[in-house]
Image: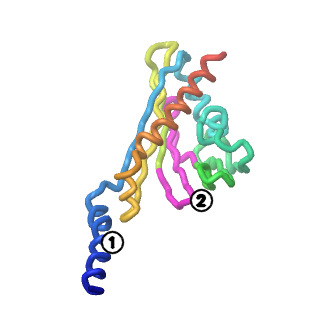
Amino acid sequence: MIKKLSYLVLFIIAIPLVTALFVHKEYAVEREVIIDKPKNEVFNYVKYLKNQDNFSKWAMMDPAMLKTYRGIDGEVGFVSAWDSQNPDVGTGEQEITGIDEGKRIDFELRFFKPFESTEPAYMVTEAINESSTRVKWGFSGHMDYPMNLMFLFMDFEQIIGDDLQTGLDNLKTLQEKY
């Protein structure tokens, strides 16, 4: 009887571990918005990480979070760090890793708490015409085995995508005010 129970327990443990071998480990999310402002004005706003405090959903989740900065904002190498007691915000930093002036900003997001991870993100501005700009905000990530099993129960692309879209909608409202 004990031998059969042991096999049953091993089988129950093995099923999710084997399943996780076949679940994807990567995800990528991109959302966009059209802002009725010229591209250079929009780009010159989004290239400064400190401005994300005014539109990013994540930056607004904990007004009491500690924020620190290193370097010159709007330039490659600038780092914006945060430390929050809110587990949905956690602790981490974001660094500008590349700027294609007027077109694209690349970031590296480094999360320290509640989990450790380093992931790329970007913002792209494209002129639709002289007075309208498409802004794309993208993020990609991964979950190592066996944590990738969470992809079966949570739609990370939807969750992160909704947060990106909220930030872009806030950016649109903010930019079109003036």
Secondary element at tag 1: helix
Residue drawn at (66%, 41%) of the image: 73
Q: Label 1, on which residue?
A: 13
Q: Amino acid at mark 1?
A: Ile
Residue occupying the point 58% across, 32% down = 46
Camera-side residue: 161 or 46?
A: 161
Dividing the picture into quarters, in which one does residue 170 lie?
A: top right
Dot label at residue 109 = none
Return the residue found at the far front: 1
Residue 32 in picture, x, y percent from top left = 45, 29
> Which residue is at 30% across, 86% downward?
2
In the rendering, which numbered label is found on residue 113?
2
Q: Which residues are magenta?
A: 95-119
The percent coordinates of residue 65 (x first, y second) are 71, 48
Element marked by disc 2: strand
Which of labels 2 and 1 is toward the front?
A: 1
Q: Is residue 83 visible?
A: no
Tell me: residue 104, above or below residue 88: above
Residue 158 sits in quarter: top left
In which quadrant of the rendered image does the N terminus lie?
bottom left
Q: Residue furthest top?
A: 130
Main secondary structure found in the magenta portion: strand
Q: Quadrant of residue 173?
A: top right
Q: Residue at x 46, y 42 (%)?
A: 159
Q: Label 2 vs label 1: CA separation?
A: 28 Å
- 2 or 27: nearer the viewer: 2
Q: Does the magenta-highlighted stretch encompass residue 103? A: yes
- Colour scheme in use: rainbow
- Asked whether the viewer can see residue 12, the reply is yes
Q: Which circle's residue, 2 or 1, is located before the other in the chain?
A: 1
Q: Nearer the viewer, residue 170 or 130?
A: 170
State yes or no: discs 2 and 1 in contact (Cβ < 8 Å).
no
